[in-house]
Amino acid sequence: MSVQVAATDTEPAHSLSASFELSGTPQRGRLDMNTPLGSTVARASWSPEAVVLNTPQGQTRHENLDEMTRAVVGEALPVPALFDWLRGRPWPGAVSVAAVTPEPAGFSQLGWRVDLSRFDEARLVARRAAPPAVTVLVKLDLR
């Protein structure tokens, strides 16, 4: 997974690349992010009781998943929706709009444009245009 956040008037552009494993459900789950060499970047776990982030700098608790992803990548990512997006479908928890030709296959949801044009190659791209622009590139490992 690669997350790229565009520069704004007050913040420089930044990015994060890591292998990841997403497990569980939007209500109770875990997200592990590791460097290509296997070092832990972050391990997040959540339940109705708590959202906890473990990094090499220590453990922090967060109000919600948006706040937690903002702490890791600098912007909120729609983690509950990712469970469905990674399966090539819209999340049932919010309205979605199917892409129309000539746009690539996919849909728009939660302010993100999910491009599924390379989903058959196990690739997904999600883009949020709202400032700052954010691009999430995913290469799925279909073991």
Image (cartoon, grey):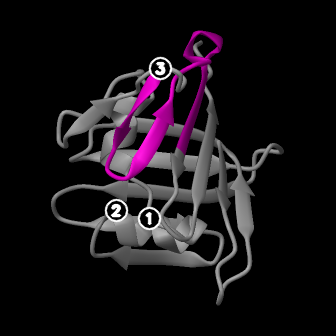
Residue 51: mark? none
Image position of 124 (left or right of 7): left
Toward the viewer: 1 or 96? 96
Q: Residues within 10 Å of mark 2 (few under 14, many from 20)?
A: many
Toward the viewer: 81 or 38? 81
Q: Is residue 116 above or below residue 132?
A: above
| Residue drawn at 67 percent across, 66 percent down | 6
Amino acid tagged 1: Ala
The residues bearing labels 2 and 1 have C-alpha atoms spaced at a distance of: 8 Å
| Residue drawn at 68 percent across, 48 percent down | 34
Q: Position of residue 118 (x, y in %)?
A: 62, 18
The residues bearing labels 3 and 1 have C-alpha atoms spaced at a distance of: 29 Å
Q: Is residue 46 above or below residue 127?
A: below
Visible residue check, residue 54: yes
The numbered mark, 3 or 2, whose residue comes first in the sequence reads: 2
Image quarter of the N terminus: top right
Q: Residues within 10 Å of mark 1 (few under 14, many from 20)?
A: some
Image position of 114 (left or right of 57): left
Q: Is residue 68 above or below residue 117?
A: below
Q: Which residue is mark 1?
A: 76
Circle 3 SS class: loop
Q: Residues within 10 Å of mark 3 (few under 14, many from 20)?
A: few
Residue 65: mark? 2
Image quarter of the C terminus: top right
Count every numbered label the image shows and give the total: 3
Q: Which residue is mark 3?
A: 101
Mark 3, mark 2: which one is toward the viewer? 3
Image position of 114 (left or right of 107): right
Circle 2 SS class: helix
